[in-house]
Each structure stands twice: as structure tokens, then as C-alpha cells.
Amino acid sequence: MTTRNDSVMHYSSFSLPLGVGLFLTSFFSAADGTVRDEQHNAGRDSKPSLLSQVRTPEDDSVPALLKVNVALKMEAFSLRNKKLRHGDKRENELELEPLARLRFSLLEGHPVYGVAEVELKDKTKRETGKPGRNKTRLELTQIYLGLDADALDTHFRLGRWLYRDEREWLLDENIDGVLARWKSGRWRADVLGGRIDYWQRDLLDRTSRDAGKTTAMGAIVRRKLGSDWLAGAYALASENTHDAHYSQFHYGLRSHDERREGLRHWAEIGLMSGNKSGNRHSGFAADVGGTYVFASRLRPRLTLGYAYASKNYRQTGLQSNEATLGGNTKLNIYGATLAPELTNLHVITAGIGVDITPDASLDLIYHDYRQAQTADLEAHNGDLKSRYDNRSTTRLGSGIDLVWGVQVNKRLKTELIMGMFTPSKRFRSGASDNAPGSAPAYSIGFEAELRF
């Protein structure tokens, strides 16, 4: 459950008073334009002059010079038995993170505008046998200048901005650099380049600049084949995302249809090459599947998918692998508890879901995991480990997730994701041959967000 959102937020907002608005008009000119969302599909309508756009409490129909959006959020995540042990040898961890988000939008709706977003976070982490840790951060998550170049059918962002691709399979990251989004007819293209945390991220910590010099640049081209269907190709080069002095190049084809009813689908076919100090490798990955949503009030749905990655394939390291499966809550597409990176892995996914009410959804998702070639469990997730792994089979085990989400009202949303990973017979609870099998691991994630 990620917290960042670069779409225009539908919070209630307040505006600068008229006098301050008039003062700022000497620094900015008026023209036509609009803020784009992540799909760059907002229309262009003629706008009134800048002076007429100073919003008053009585008139909410025109954009303000300055809008301030506020959100309060609480996130909690518990991972139980992360070493897959029995009894008093179990090790657990708990993370709690309340946050407050402020988003400032200057001259929204104009061809030149600005956005700044800060998040105040207080994260507490507790692990079995270790003292609790707490850190307060004031993160500058976004700050960019936007430009709508109508003559070029292109929108530019310069600064720090959030970028997410479909299913967050390549990117879910705040990037310091340049983003150009082009749209013409049925075609769309995003071209981006920059560095992760080139500027200080935590305003309370001068060391929060990226010492590893993580960079990314690439392009994603899409063609609209239906009202909710996009297909295209991508190429992405990145450095230092997994390890220092490691460079990689990803390219592939993709198709996504996110219609509300009927057959939704996703398809990813990807190739990559990597290089670290002259040691080169390459790999292949594919992820295909679909969700059929029946046309009824409860929107019952069935999901089936299959993902594969060869032994040497690695994802970008900037992904989060999160999407919905027809419901209103995002989930980890490869399972909440194991939450693996797609590398050296086969994943079979099956799920059912229903909308309990128009504002509440419930999904039950099953995953089966098998390695392409036998390797350590830690290669897929650093949080789950097994001390006794005899590697007698490539099968890792299975996972099941229960995903519940409720949009309580326009301002409040809650999400609950409960997961379990059941290890296969290759994982034991002791070194002896007759030691019992490892015990399951469990996870619980809760999130509540209140927008003002």
C-alpha cells in the first residue's frame, strides 16, 4: 500500500486572499492550459483571466492562485514469524507510521504552474529481541515546475516528481529530473530522465541525499486501442538501483486494459541486460493474466495470471508491483507476505472478489511460487529467511491474501490486507533430517487516510 499520489487530489482547499492574489499577478502571466493527470488526458478549455481566478469562499467554480491540500494518514504493517520458525523461536516485526501530507499548487490550470509536496512522518519499528527504533522525517516528496506546451502537444515537469507506470512494474519513484509527456490522437509517450534523491529528501537530515547516485532514464510509448486499453513498448536504463556500480537496461512490450466490467487484462514481455564491473548477464520475464468482472451490482470477479522470470532477470529496483484486481484497493500483485521481486521465479495467481457495497470491496487472492532454478529464499525477499533450507525442490510454497477496502466517504478511506505464506517441504525447523517443516509466516497491513 503505497502512499504517494501524483494525480490531482480532490481535497477541499483554501485560497490566497484577494489582496495577496493581486500582488502575485505582477509576477505571472495568464494564458490557457490545464494540469495533466498520470494519463495526460485532461482537456483544454479557455480560462478566464488570472485576476478572475482568485477564488473566494462564495465561488468554488474557478481555480485558485494557490491551493493547499491536506491529508492525514496512518500506516501499520506487521510481519509475523519472518524466520519461519516454531514456538518461542519466532521473530516478528511491527512498523507504525503516521504521516501528514501538505500539497501546494500554484497557478493550477495555467500553462506554467508549480507544485510542492511535503510529508511529516514518524516511523516506529519494533523487532523481536531488539530495542524499538523511531525516526521523524520531514520529506520533500515533490517540488516541480510544470509547463504545458500546447503547440507541441507536450507537458513538461522539471524538478522532483512522482512517476508510476501501469501496475508499478517498472517505476514507482520520486525522481529529480525532467519528464516530458506527449499526446497526439491515440498515441502517448513519456520520456524521463533523472536521479533518485539528487536533492536532500529529508529536510531534517542532511545525509538523505543519494550517495549511491541512483539514476534512471527511458521512454514509454503507448497507443490507445480502446476506452481503457493501452498497448505499447518501453526502454529504461538505470544505474545503482540494486548495487553500487551496477547498470541495467530494460526493454519490452506491454498491454493493459482496465475496463470496469468484462475482461480486463495485463501482459508484460520484458528483456533486460545487466553489467557490474564487467560481469554481464541478461534475462527474460513475462507476466500475463486477466480479471473478468461480471456486470451486476456486486461486480463479482475472477482473476487468473501467470508470471515468469529467468534466473538472471532482475526488475528495475524502482518498482513496487502494486495494482488492483478489479476492486478499489491496490495490493502487491505477487503476494503481501512473501512480496517477491520477479526474478528466478514462476508465480501462478488466482483470485475471486466482490464489491460488498458500491464503496467497499473484498478480494481473496492465491499465489503459488516455484523457482526457475534452485536458489536461496532471500534472493526474492530480504525480510523472509529460513536457516534450514535443504533445497530439495524448486517449489517455495504458497501464499494467500485477503484484501478489504472501504471508501467510507469522500474524505476517508481504509484498507486492510492480511496475508499468509506457507513454505514448502524444503524448509525445515531444524538441522536434523526428521525435523518438522517450517511454520508459516503472516502479515497484516492497515492503512487509513483522511483528506481535508
Image (cartoon, grey):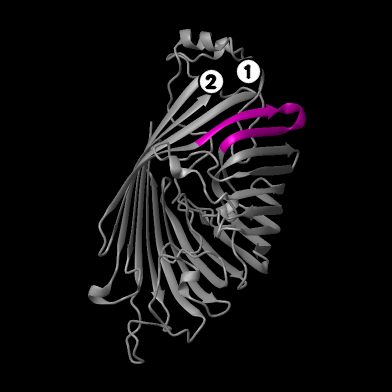
User: As drawn, is 387 to the left or to the right of 144?
Assistant: left
Q: Mark 1 = which residue?
A: 47
Q: Amino acid at mark 2?
A: Pro
Q: Amino acid at mark 1?
A: Lys
How much space separates mark 1 and mark 2, taking CA atoms? 9 Å
Q: Quadrant of residue 163?
A: top right
Q: Residue 79 location in percent, x, y?
A: 34, 62
Closer to the chain start, of discs 1 and 2, is 1
Q: Residue 442 location in percent, x, y?
A: 34, 66
For the residue pair 409 and 394, the one nearer the viewer reads as 394
For the residue pair 262 and 110, the one nearer the viewer reads as 110
Q: Mark 2 = which residue?
A: 63
Q: Quadrant of residue 313?
A: bottom right
Q: Is residue 162 visible?
A: yes
Q: Residue at x 25, y 57 (%)?
A: 131
Contact? badges 1 and 2 (CB < 8 Å): yes
> What segment carries the magenta color?
142-160
Q: Residues within 10 Å of mark 1 (few under 14, many from 20)?
A: some
Q: Secondary structure at mark 1?
A: loop
Asked if residue 102 is among those painted magenta in the image, a careful observer would answer no
Asked if residue 153 is among those painted magenta in the image, a careful observer would answer yes
Q: Secondary structure at mark 2?
A: loop
Q: Residues within 10 Å of mark 2 (few under 14, many from 20)?
A: many
Q: Residue at x 51, y 60 (%)?
A: 333
In the displayed structure, would residue 82 be above or below residue 1?
below
Q: Residue 279 location in percent, x, y?
A: 66, 68
Q: Residue at x 68, y 38 (%)?
A: 181
* Type of secondary structure dominating the magenta stretch: strand
Q: Residue 340 location in percent, x, y?
A: 49, 65
